[in-house]
Amino acid sequence: MESKESSLGTPSVAASNAYAQGLTQFQGFWIPSRSVPTSSIIAFQKYFQALDDDIIVVSKPKSGTTWLKALVFSIVNLPYLDIHLYKENPNPDLSAISSPRLFSTHLPYPMLADSIKRSNCRIVYINRNPFAVIVSLWHFFSFMDDWSVEDCFEMFCKGEEGYEELKEDAVKLSEFLGFPFSIEEEKTGLVNQIVDFYSFNNLKDLDWRLTKLGRLFFRSGKVGDYVNHLSPTAVERLSNILEEKLSGRDLTFK
């Protein structure tokens, strides 16, 4: 498969910004090429062979990925396809991974390996309120001195850069994954126990996350927190963009 990288290696917005300088336009999308080299994407698209019982967790960065992976893991072990496996080895041996295999990626659907699209594997996609994604992304890269919430907002609106309801749909998720809860498990409260155990506060307090990096992954977990960071003008602008892009689609955000 032939793939060409665009010569537009730096986005037009905030060109002096460290995060912006790490973006590369590739196959129609802005990719953070420092963490996800285009070579790893090409290798993934070329060599990955999906199995019908694979489970792929797909998300935009800072959209509740860690929480969803933990929940899926508890229902059914979950490496990143683009960031880990195909970055370290262009053609890794995945035969030793027991089925059902669990993988995760931040790549958009058009960039997934063709074998995934042709197979019957299950794709679990988490879609978070874009306002919340902007604020979480800004906080995640807060270690960069020249990274303002205004820069983050501009890049997000130019494409450069349902979490809450899923807490109520663990049963539906388990059925989709092919691991439905039994009636007895539902009666004994196992579903609520799993959701509570993998709640935001519990994940935030796990020992392995109690580091500076961990604090970047887990911030507040509150719905609507973006109003404390974005101006009314910014909220109105993004609302208009969402209304235009999502017109005719049955998709709303809390």
Image (spheres, grey):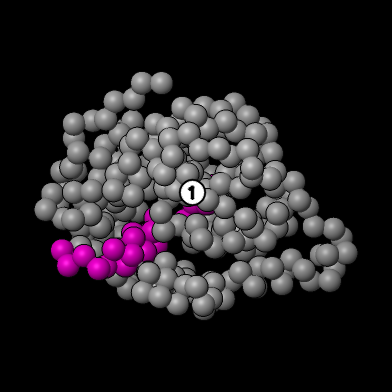
Q: Quadrant of residue 8?
A: top left
Measuring from the top left, give residue 209's x and y in whole percent.
Answer: 47, 72
Does residue 33 appear in this view? yes
Q: Is residue 122 left or right of residue 151?
A: right
Measuring from the top left, give residue 113's x and y in whole percent.
Answer: 49, 31
Q: Is residue 179 left or right of residue 218?
A: right
At x 21%, y 65%, the residue is: 144
Assess whether residue 134 is covered by the magenta stretch.
yes
At x 56%, y 46%, the residue is: 103
Q: Nearer the viewer, residue 183 or 143?
A: 143
Q: Which residue is mark 1?
A: 80
Q: Nearer the viewer, residue 210 or 178?
A: 210
Q: Quadrant of residue 142?
A: bottom left
Measuring from the top left, give residue 190's x and y in whole percent.
Answer: 77, 68
Mark 1, Cα crowd under 10 Å, few <14 / some 14-19 / many 20+, is some
Measuring from the top left, give residue 101's x and y in whole percent.
Answer: 64, 44
Image quarter (top left, top right, bottom left or bottom right) of the N terminus: top left
